[in-house]
Image: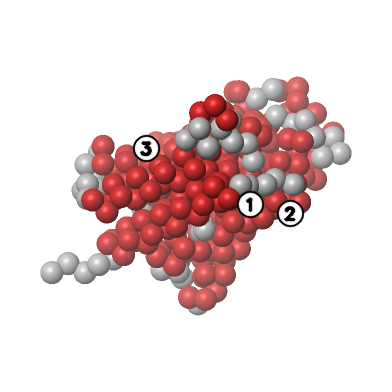
Amino acid sequence: MRFSGVGLVMLAAICWGFSGGIATILMNKGWDPIVISLYRGAVGFICFFAWFLFGFRQNWIFSTRLYIWSLLAGFGVAGNFTFYFVSIQASSIAVAATLMYTAPLFVLLISFLLRIERSTWFKWGCISGVLIGIILLTGAYNTESMSVSFLGTIAGLASGLAYALFIFGFKNASSIEKPQTTLTIAFFSLCLILFLFTDKDEAASVLMSSDIGWFLLLGIVGAGISFIFYLIGIRWTALTTASMVAMVEPVTASLFGVLLIGDHLTIIQLLGMVLILVTITVLSVKQSEKKFMPSN
């Protein structure tokens, strides 16, 4: 079962990596990132709602705390999808995926502020390592000729921050009720949030366009089955292993960008990317080990 779990988590990460490529194709066709995010979330909601209905009696619960945390998760995933696609549009898939992968760093910083985590030299060393990696990846060491636009950098980091918000909301909501209930509520709220900001005419035109297949594929691969694969796989996988396997996502996204779209990174950017991914993975593994370490 353990190896099946690793396979499902890896498959989910690959799906998320490909979702950035599919979104890039749609943005190159002229579609707005918010419209793309809305359809990704809407198709995902349909998948989660169907999953929810399979065990309706066991999944249904009335809890104010559940709705509040799930709504927070919905805000987080709405921001994550949208800022990620904006970052791709303003920079590249590789840069956007890597900056989004800084989410565990934001979780750590928020935990410091809320006094959930204790500050240590190791954790601040990881934070410093990620910051150096971001500087190398974006070219911020030379402000006159940055390799990544300011919008691409800010949007990428914002997607990571939004993903951290989703993690907090989803974790607290799932402690109250089953994850399929949380995802159903979260993605329903995502649809409502993004619908308020999207271009209604453009969103409606998707249904009659020749690109509808790409939108459906993005929603199924990038939200529906990928989250289901991940939630099933994580039950059979140690969190330390899952943290390392999740690194497949930015790698897949980067390969998609390089091989199929023609993106390219300099040696310095590659070093920055590796530094961020390795540091975040080490931090995630250490945090997971600490949670399961027996007390004396």
- The residues tagged by marks 2 and 3 sit, at their Cα atoms, a distance apart of 47 Å
Which mark's residue is nearer the viewer, 3 or 1?
A: 1
Residue type at mark 1 is Ser
Residue type at mark 2 is Leu
Which of the numbered marks, if any, corresponds to residue 254?
Answer: 1
Residue 203, percent across and down? 73, 28
Residue 150, percent across and down? 54, 28
- For marks 2 and 1 on the same chain, the one whose residue lies earlier in the sequence: 1
- For marks 3 and 1 on the same chain, the one whose residue lies earlier in the sequence: 3
Residue 279, percent across and down? 41, 54
Which of the numbered marks, if any, corresponds to residue 259?
Answer: 2
Residue 68, percent across and down? 39, 36
Q: Residue at x 36, y 56 (%)?
A: 283
- For marks 2 and 3 on the same chain, the one whose residue lies earlier in the sequence: 3
Q: Residues within 10 Å of mark 3 (few under 14, many from 20)?
A: few
Q: Secondary structure at mark 2?
A: helix
Decide: is 104 above or below 196.
below
Q: Residues within 10 Å of mark 2 (few under 14, many from 20)?
A: few
Quadrant for the C terminus in the image: bottom left
Q: Secondary structure at mark 1?
A: helix
Which of the numbered marks, if any, corresponds to residue 266?
Answer: none
Which of the numbered marks, if any, corresponds to residue 64?
Answer: 3
Q: Residue at x 63, y 47 (%)?
A: 265
The extreme left residue here reads 296
Q: Residue at x 55, y 46 (%)?
A: 269
Q: Residue at x 44, y 60 (%)?
A: 243
